[in-house]
């Protein structure tokens, strides 16, 4: 039986599969919102991500696992190799080839999600717990589903499965609290999570009960976009999608996380 975390991954991946089935062939060649990638390359990256999920869940490790925050912090340094691997995956595939490759990768991933998860696995960026590895794949699927939707605005956007969106938000919020420990700022992303963190230069004023001195609140998708560098703090505050109260309620220096 598929575990809850694996189920979230598969559900979000299936929604993307359904979206790809109705995506016009000509849209594959459009520029994506990711610099240097067209829609075709972005889809190839998702194929690679699902294949990686299957491969890594079959690579148990005896090493001490790192955290999600530690793992995703290595993405920036690996950007060039990720780009190269993505382009190798995409090759000279046309639209139908990519649809078939994605569907097959999803089928294999669904079979893997029904198997026990190793306590620790060997991921491309190092050892990580088996469950946390799935959390990182969910972040990928949720983030890139949004990337695809924004890249092809003329097509109905990809639905964000609540179970997957909640998982991605909680994982990223946990990474924020880990990287910037403290209690001076409370970050609320209703209805999924609230975490406390400090600033890059230290914790600042602390609180032990009641409302903290600095409170930030935003919606789940905006938080994902901020945490993954898709948008900027000041822009979201101006647009009213982030509410911030307190003189230290500013995450400009903490975000993005990856």
Image (cartoon, rainbow, N blue to C red):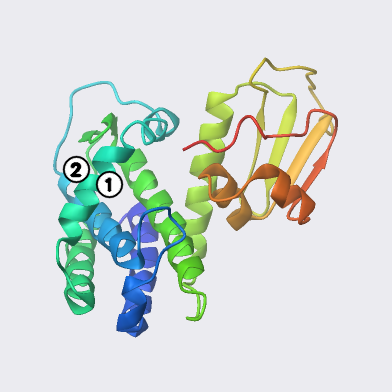
Q: Which residue is mark 2?
A: 56
Labelled disc at residue 138: none
Q: CA distance from mark 1 to mark 2?
A: 19 Å
Please give the name of the residue rendered at 68% of the width and 15% of the height, measured from the top-left corner. Answer: 202
78 to the left or right of 200: left
* Tag 1 secondary structure: helix
Please give the name of the residue rendered at 19% of the width and 43% of the height, measured from the top-left corner. Answer: 56
Q: From the image, which quarter does the N terminus lie in?
A: bottom left
User: Looking at the picture, how far across and down is residue 198, in whole percent?
Assistant: 67, 23
Total number of numbered labels?
2
Please give the name of the residue rendered at 22% of the width and 38% of the height, measured from the top-left corner. Answer: 118
* Tag 2 secondary structure: helix
113 to the left or right of 19: left
Q: Nearer the viewer, residue 77 or 64?
A: 77
Q: Nearer the viewer, residue 166 or 123?
A: 123
200 to the left or right of 240: left
Labelled disc at residue 83: 1
Badge 1 or badge 2: first in the primary sequence: 2
Q: Quadrant of residue 18?
A: bottom left
Q: Quadrant of residue 108?
A: bottom left
Q: Quadrant of residue 17?
A: bottom left
């Amino acid at each position: 039986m598929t575990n809850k975390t694996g189920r979230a991954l598969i559900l979000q991946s299936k929604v993307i599969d359904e979206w790809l089935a109705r995506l016009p062939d000509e849209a594959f060649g459009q520029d994506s919102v990711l610099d240097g990638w067209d829609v075709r390359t972005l889809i190839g990256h998702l194929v690679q991500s699902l294949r990686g999920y299957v491969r890594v869940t079959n690579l148990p490790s005896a090493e001490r696992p790192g955290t999600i925050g530690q793992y995703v912090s290595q993405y920036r340094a690996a950007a060039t190799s990720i780009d190269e691997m993505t382009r190798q995956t995409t090759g000279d595939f046309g639209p139908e080839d990519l649809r078939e490759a994605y569907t097959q990768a999803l089928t294999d991933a669904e079979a893997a999600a029904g198997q026990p998860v190793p306590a620790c696995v060997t991921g491309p960026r190092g050892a990580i717990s088996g469950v946390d590895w799935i959390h990182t794949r969910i972040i990928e699927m949720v983030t890139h589903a949004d990337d695809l939707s924004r890249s092809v605005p003329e097509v109905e956007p990809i639905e964000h499965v609540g179970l997957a969106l909640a998982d991605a938000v909680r994982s990223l919020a946990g990474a924020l609290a880990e990287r910037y420990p403290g209690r001076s700022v409370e970050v609320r992303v209703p209805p999924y999570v609230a975490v406390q963190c400090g600033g890059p230069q230290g914790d600042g004023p602390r609180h032990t009960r009641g409302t903290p001195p600095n409170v930030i609140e935003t919606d789940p998708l905006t938080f994902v976009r901020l945490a993954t560098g898709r948008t900027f703090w000041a822009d979201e505050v101006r647009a009213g999608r982030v509410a911030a109260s307190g003189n230290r309620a500013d995450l400009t220096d903490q975000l993005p996380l990856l």
